Amino acid sequence: MKILKLLKETYPDVETALDFENPYQLLVATILSAQTTDIQVNKVTNNLFPKYPSPKELSEATQEELENDIKTIGLYKNKSKNLIKTGKILMEKFNGVIPDTREGLMELPGAGRKTANVVLSNAFNIPAIAVDTHVFRVSRRLGLSQGKTPDEVEQDLMKIIPKEDWKDAHHWLIWHGRLVCKAQNPNCQSCPLSSECCFFQNSH
DNA sequence: AACTCGGGGCA
DNA sequence: TGCCCAGAGTT
């Protein structure tokens, strides 16, 4: 089943990437990306990275100033608090180096399962597919992963997506989940995957 | 399992 | 103008 190939052909202009130059920048950008889009994050990081170029500067930021720096993004109070704390943990426990393990990344406040996988796959080239609510729902409907956990969904997706696409796959799956395979009233008529989809077969 | 954070996107 | 959410933490 060529899911990703079909999605790429269907959404050729999908917005696909956070701008980053090193693991630290990708970690910060990905923590910021919760409940918003990469487009919004890139607007903020353009000014944020020169101002806080490494975990050291981040750990020394004041709450008020960092909040102001990311105010155009939602959830900015939680995110600024988490980022400062993350900066301090990086300095105190990881010697200012971004950890390249899932366990290490998930010790950082603001970084969960999805953030860890994005950083592992895109900054360290470690095999992983990021699974968020959209990816989870799309996979369930396709019938790949009923009743499974997000970690198990990740394993299932890795079986049917070419390895070279793992680090970017979530962008197309998320886009598809938002615009077509929506949580409510999915638009199965315009879905390129409907012929392969359990949800569609069961509801028609 | 439900609630919270929040500006932006979309109907 | 009102509703929902490209997660993660807390209770």
Image (tube, coloured by chain):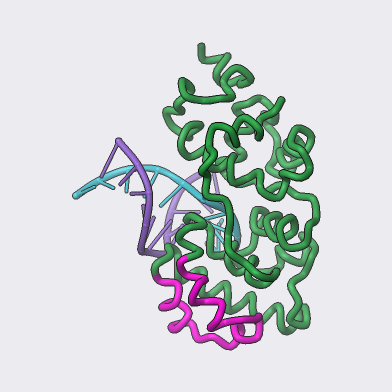
Chain colours: A green, B purple, C cyan
In the image, residue A75 lies at what x, y percent?
Answer: 45, 64
Near-viewer residue (A187 or A103): A187
Q: Quadrant of residue A137?
A: top right
In the image, residue A157 lies at what x, y percent?
Answer: 72, 37
Near-viewer residue (B2 or A102): A102
In the image, residue A99 lies at what x, y percent?
Answer: 77, 69
- Compared with residue A12, is residue B8 higher up or lower down, i.e. above or below? below
Q: Quadrant of the N terminus of chain A?
A: top right
Q: Is residue A82 left or right of residue A122?
A: left
Residue reaching furthest top?
Answer: A204
Residue positioned 75% across, 35% down in the render: A156
Is A161 included in the stretch rendered in magenta? no
Residue positioned 43% across, 65% down in the render: A73
Residue positioned 65% across, 53% down in the render: A114
In the image, residue A142 lies at what x, y percent?
Answer: 63, 26
- Compared with residue A188, is residue A38 higher up or lower down, i.e. above or below? below
Task: Provide the residue span drawn in magenta.
Answer: A43-71
Residue positioned 58% across, 64% down in the render: A19
What is the magenta segment's predominant secondary structure?
A: helix
How many numbered circles are shown?
0
- Compared with residue A107, is residue C3 higher up or lower down, i.e. above or below? above
Is A67 included in the stretch rendered in magenta? yes
Q: Quadrant of residue A138?
A: top right
